[in-house]
């Protein structure tokens, strides 16, 4: 809104031209979202449903969360929404993508609120539906003649270093990336501040890539990747959400007073994937959320390997390494390695900060 108002207001007072600056909008939106959430959350969280704990994880502290307000992602994202509308100059299809993120949040909140938790099949199908919708919106909003322009790691394409990918390929791949990242982020939400902190770090780096790398022509040309006109606008969305969830993390620090629940983790996971797709590289999410993917996605990989081995006639004993490692990995660290919640949080953050820059350099530079 402010971006579009600036051209009407500038003739009346020159400094209004600053409202057309993406840097000003990014900084102002981040600050306003953080301030609004910091003020509003303590006034709203008593209206949230109460967490029932995770009896299945009782031995790793899964019942400690019982009784705390959960589903705070509902209020955090609702507080952030007007800030996004005021500060982020989004095109129609980009706004539709944001609405798909909010649909994922609503489904997560309804699950948080339900007396009987939803089954995995129901949640998986709903997640798949909103992921498919978001993939369609991203494709409709950004494809060119012949398909979507995508740059890939280790390869240089014929069109400004990129390749053209048809919608029949792009949409299914994008749908899977959105669905997978949403669910592994949700699986990582088991230690106070863990999923939120790791995702905020990923989003902050995404904002840098969107604004300075793929959204800035000299840097994009240096890395031999195409320039994406809407990238800087998505950097504003990403940083507004960073500000909002940063305020939440203030109250979620151990011992937490409030939990974001599926409403928050599903929204954050899907936003990381959607903003990664906006960079033009569908696989950059692997570099931005390596710890989240290993932590939350390792269980899925373990299940697939065990079932494949069984079908092929291989018997994997109970003492095999793959069976001894618990997933999500933070449960293994707490139960088997006897790490405290604070140790899990700090060490996972340090791993993320150490691994992410290396992977990003490889993806951006080795092409």
Image: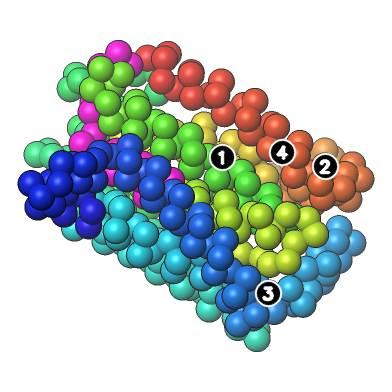
Q: Name the residue under label 3.
A: 69
Q: Residue 233 in magenta?
A: yes
Tell me how far mark 2 sits from mark 1, CA to CA: 18 Å
Q: Residue 88 in magenta?
A: no
Badge 1 marks a residue whose secondary structure is helix
Q: Name the residue under label 2.
A: 343
Q: Where is residue 211, by image quadrant?
A: top left
Dot 4 crowding, Cα within 10 Å, few <14, some 14–19, many 20+: many
Tell me how far mark 4 sits from mark 3, CA to CA: 25 Å
Tell me how far mark 2 sits from mark 3, CA to CA: 24 Å
Please tell me which residue is depicted at 65% across the width and 80% down the height of the picture. Answer: 46
Q: Residue 348 carries which label?
A: 4
Badge 4 marks a residue whose secondary structure is helix
Please tell me which residue is depicted at 44% across the width and 69% down the height of the picture. Answer: 78
Q: Mark 1 or mark 4: name the one nearer the start of the chain.
A: 1
Badge 3 marks a residue whose secondary structure is loop
Q: Name the residue under label 1.
A: 201
Please tell me which residue is depicted at 55% across the width and 45% down the height of the picture. Answer: 200
Q: Residue 319 carries which label?
A: none
- Magenta region: which residues? 221-240
Tell me how far mark 1 sits from mark 3, CA to CA: 24 Å
Q: Mark 2 or mark 4: name the one nearer the start of the chain.
A: 2
């Amino acid at each position: 809104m402010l971006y579009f108002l600036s051209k009407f207001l500038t003739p009346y007072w020159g400094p209004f031209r600053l409202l057309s600056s993406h840097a000003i909008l990014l900084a102002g939106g981040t600050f306003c979202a953080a301030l609004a959430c910091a003020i509003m959350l303590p006034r709203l969280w008593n209206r949230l449903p109460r967490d029932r704990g995770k009896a299945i994880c009782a031995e790793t502290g899964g019942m400690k969360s019982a009784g705390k307000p959960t589903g705070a992602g509902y209020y955090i994202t609702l507080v952030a929404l007007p800030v996004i509308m005021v500060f982020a100059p989004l095109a129609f299809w980009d706004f539709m993508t944001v609405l798909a993120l909010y649909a994922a949040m609503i489904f997560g909140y309804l699950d948080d609120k339900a007396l009987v938790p939803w089954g995995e099949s129901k949640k998986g199908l709903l997640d798949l539906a909103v992921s498919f919708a978001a993939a369609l919106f991203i494709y409709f909003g950004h494809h060119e003649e012949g398909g979507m322009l995508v740059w890939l790691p280790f390869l240089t394409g014929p069109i400004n270093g990129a390749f053209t990918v048809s919608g029949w390929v792009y949409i299914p791949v994008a749908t899977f990336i959105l669905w997978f990242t949403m669910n592994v982020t949700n699986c990582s939400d088991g230690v106070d501040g863990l999923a939120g902190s790791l995702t905020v770090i990923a989003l902050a780096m995404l904002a840098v890539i969107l604004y300075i790398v793929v959204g800035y022509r000299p840097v994009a040309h240096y890395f031999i990747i195409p320039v994406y006109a809407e990238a800087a606008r998505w950097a504003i969305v990403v940083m507004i959400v960073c500000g909002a969830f940063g305020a939440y993390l203030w109250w979620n620090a151990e011992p937490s007073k409030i939990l974001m629940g599926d409403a928050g983790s599903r929204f954050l996971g899907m936003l990381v994937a959607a903003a990664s797709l906006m960079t033009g590289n569908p696989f950059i999410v692997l570099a931005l959320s390596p710890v989240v993917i290993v932590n939350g996605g390792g269980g899925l990989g373990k299940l697939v390997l065990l079932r494949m081995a069984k079908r092929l006639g291989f018997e994997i004993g109970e003492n095999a390494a793959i069976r001894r490692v618990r997933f999500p990995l933070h449960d293994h660290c707490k139960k088997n390695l006897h790490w405290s919640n604070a140790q899990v949080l700090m060490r996972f953050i340090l791993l993320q900060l150490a691994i992410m820059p290396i992977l990003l350099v490889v993806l951006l530079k080795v092409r």
